[in-house]
């Protein structure tokens, strides 16, 4: 065996065996049983939030359909959107997996889970992936706790965690354990899609990414803590005001949460402080803290959940690449593996983070990010420029050759060891990038264009049939039903015949039946349209009887569902 393989094998073996040894360790037994005891002792509270925070208990098939029935339902009879989807979409394995997944908090259940996760580490790339994501989730867990502690200190106690529980340490630990277990399943699925060549490893894992710079992290943390204390304070004040109003016999409607600016561009429903965030969508402060706030609420799994939207995209792109140029004499161009020749619109792109993952897989693609918020578009532009800079820097450092984050990490470790005089065997240079439908390194790379447009999804300033692909992440639950229907019609209009629409948003009723009883609670977090969204049949809105698109595929990933549609040719 060559000596160069030693550090590699050691890393893989360590990651995989740490998980397995933990699962078998008698030393872990008391902690596992304590976790079990904590979980069973702490009764669930009906005030637990839904989408982002998961209920602590398994509700079976959810006989309590309080949310389902109280939602102003766009759905027919008693069928849930999840049941309706099953009749229309080709469902990936993830759909049954998440419909049935539950956190088995018993000692043997946790052991089994650890052993299962340990078995997923088969290469140094896998080990790097797990190390990065374990760090990511721990970091966001700690940051969430810091936000709560700061809010409690400022409010004199009594601030409840948006991830559920009664705000006490025990229920916080239980909710945290459940969410960590769920995050681990998300990462396992994400890694599985990467192995299957659906998309590349996340570009931000590279060790020279700014998120590993302590100054950058400190700045984001400071902004997050400030925002979290303000959000939780506003949420509590709104609840107290509603309780006081209803005690006085008045209506318990939410307090006015209008934002500071207006424009004829903005529909009324848009001018609200959704999830009590400062200035709603309309300030630099809001845009700069958005990613860190949502990733903290999702405990670091948001990016991985959103990447599920790349699954139908990769199938579509393969189809287009295999098709070649049309022979009918039309002007349509052939689409290349790196995405060149295809045009993608990211609808409600927000700060453009998902768009960077799209571009990293299809760097030659021409992309457009559309959003109503100029402040979020500025952040999206910065994110796009940063991705471009990183991509050029990393490729130049490798001389345009292959490799990836693992290689770069090993190079950095090697350089550091040399400087401090630690003798290490020569480092291996693995081919970390899996063979997939995305871009290959080929020396000088032509990166596709990226434009930004400020407009409403309901009235897009594009001619008919402008885009091959439209992606839309976490917009639908923010829209009233009429705006959702208008946006669907617009998306169908600007899509080319044969084109693809990918929607990623919160799971709905019936997607994970065990969660149905509590899912709508997220609506109480100043999300006025959330309850309507979770009961709405998206196939009626986007499908043949709505916007006229054809249902295609469905995947689930924890709190996120991904539906795709095709425009008939
Ligand atoms: C929850 S954020 C999601 C942002 C981004 N897609 C992500 O996942 O990070 C919702 C975004 O939708 C935008 N938005 C809301 N209503 C819109 C509308 N009618 N048209 C265009 N953008 C809208 C907001 O400005 C905000 O950036």
Image (cartoon, rainbow, N blue to C red):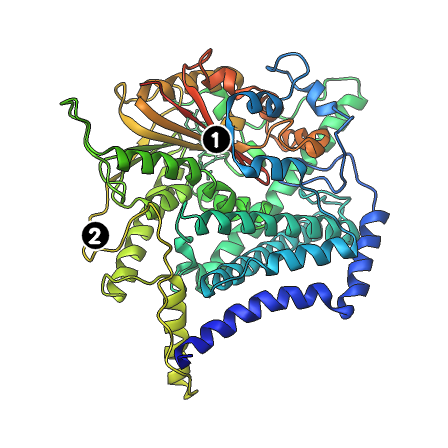
Q: Residue drawn at (16%, 22%), measured in percent from left and top?
A: 328
Q: Is residue 101 above or below residue 398?
A: above
**One can see residue 300 in this view:** no
Tags 2 and 1 touching, CB below 8 Å: no
63 to the left or right of 258: right
Q: Is mark 1 within 8 Å of ligand 1?
A: no
* Residue 269 image position (x, y, % from top left): 51, 22
**One can see residue 389 in this view:** yes
Q: How many marks?
A: 2
Residue located beneath label 1 in the image = 260
The crowding category of the residue bearing disc 2, from other C-alpha atoms within 10 Å (few below 14, some 14 to 19, many at least 20), is some
* Residue 319 image position (x, y, % from top left): 32, 34
Residue located beneath label 2 in the image = 445
Between discs 2 and 1, the one toward the N terminus = 1
Q: Residue drawn at (61%, 15%), measured in percent from left and top?
A: 75
Q: Residue drawn at (71%, 34%), measured in percent from left and top?
A: 514
- Residue 489 position by quadrant: top left
* Residue 219 image position (x, y, % from top left): 48, 57
Which disc is residue 556 wearing? none
How far apart marks 2 and 1 lie (CA) works out to 44 Å
Quadrant (top left/top right/bottom left/bottom right) for the C terminus = top left
362 to the left or right of 141: left
């Amino acid at each position: 065996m060559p000596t160069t393989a030693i550090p590699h094998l050691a890393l893989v073996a360590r990651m995989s065996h740490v998980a397995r040894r933990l699962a078998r360790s008698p030393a872990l037994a008391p902690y596992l049983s304590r976790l079990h005891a904590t979980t069973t002792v702490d009764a669930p509270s009906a005030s637990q939030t839904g989408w982002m925070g998961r209920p602590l208990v398994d509700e079976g098939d959810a006989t309590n359909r309080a949310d389902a029935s109280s939602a102003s339902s766009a759905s027919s009879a008693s069928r849930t959107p999840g049941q309706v989807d099953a009749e229309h979409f080709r469902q990936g394995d993830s759909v049954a997996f998440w419909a049935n997944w539950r956190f088995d908090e018993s000692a043997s259940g946790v052991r089994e889970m650890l052993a299962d996760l340990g078995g997923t580490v088969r290469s140094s790339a896998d080990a790097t992936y797990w190390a990065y994501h374990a760090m990511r989730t721990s970091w966001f867990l700690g940051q969430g706790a810091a936000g709560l502690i700061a809010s409690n200190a400022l409010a004199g106690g009594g601030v409840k965690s948006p991830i559920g529980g009664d705000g006490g340490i025990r229920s916080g630990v239980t909710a945290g354990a459940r969410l960590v277990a769920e995050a681990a399943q998300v990462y396992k699925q994400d890694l599985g899609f990467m192995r299957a060549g659906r998309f590349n490893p996340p570009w931000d894992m590279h060790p020279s990414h700014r998120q590993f710079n302590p100054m950058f992290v400190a700045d984001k943390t400071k902004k997050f803590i400030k925002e979290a204390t303000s959000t939780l304070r506003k949420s509590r004040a709104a609840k107290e005001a509603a309780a006081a109003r209803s005690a006085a016999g008045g209506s318990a409607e939410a307090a006015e949460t209008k934002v500071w600016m207006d424009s004829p561009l903005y529909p009324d429903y848009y001018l609200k402080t959704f999830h009590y965030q400062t200035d709603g969508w309309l300030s630099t402060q809001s845009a700069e803290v958005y990613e860190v706030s949502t990733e903290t609420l999702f405990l670091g799994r948001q990016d991985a959940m959103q990447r599920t939207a790349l699954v139908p995209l990769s199938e579509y792109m393969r189809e287009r690449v295999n098709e070649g140029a049309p022979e009918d004499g039309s002007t349509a161009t052939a689409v290349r593996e790196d995405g060149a020749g295809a045009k993608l619109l990211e609808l409600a792109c927000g700060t453009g983070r998902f768009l960077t993952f799209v571009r990293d897989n299809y760097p030659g693609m021409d992309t457009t990010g559309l959003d109503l918020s100029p402040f979020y578009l500025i952040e999206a532009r910065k994110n796009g420029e940063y991705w471009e800079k990183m991509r050029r820097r990393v490729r130049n450092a490798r001389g345009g050759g292959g490799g990836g984050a693992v290689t770069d990490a090993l190079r950095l470790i090697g350089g550091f060891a040399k400087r401090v005089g630690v003798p290490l065997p020569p480092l291996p240079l693995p081919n970390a990038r899996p063979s997939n439908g995305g871009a290959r390194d080929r020396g000088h790379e032509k990166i596709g264009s990226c434009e930004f447009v400020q407009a409403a999804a309901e009235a897009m300033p594009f001619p008919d049939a402008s885009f091959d692909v439209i992606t839309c992440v976490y917009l639908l639950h923010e829209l009233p039903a009429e705006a959702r229907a208008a946006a669907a019609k617009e998306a169908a209009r600007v899509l080319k015949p044969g084109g693809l629409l990918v929607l990623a948003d919160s799971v709905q009723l019936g997607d994970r039946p065990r969660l149905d009883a509590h899912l709508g609670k997220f609506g109480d977090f100043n999300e006025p349209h959330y309850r309507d969204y979770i009961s709405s049949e998206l196939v009626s809105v986007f499908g043949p009887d709505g916007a006229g698109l054809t249902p295609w595929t469905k995947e689930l990933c924890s709190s996120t569902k991904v539906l795709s549609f095709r425009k008939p040719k």
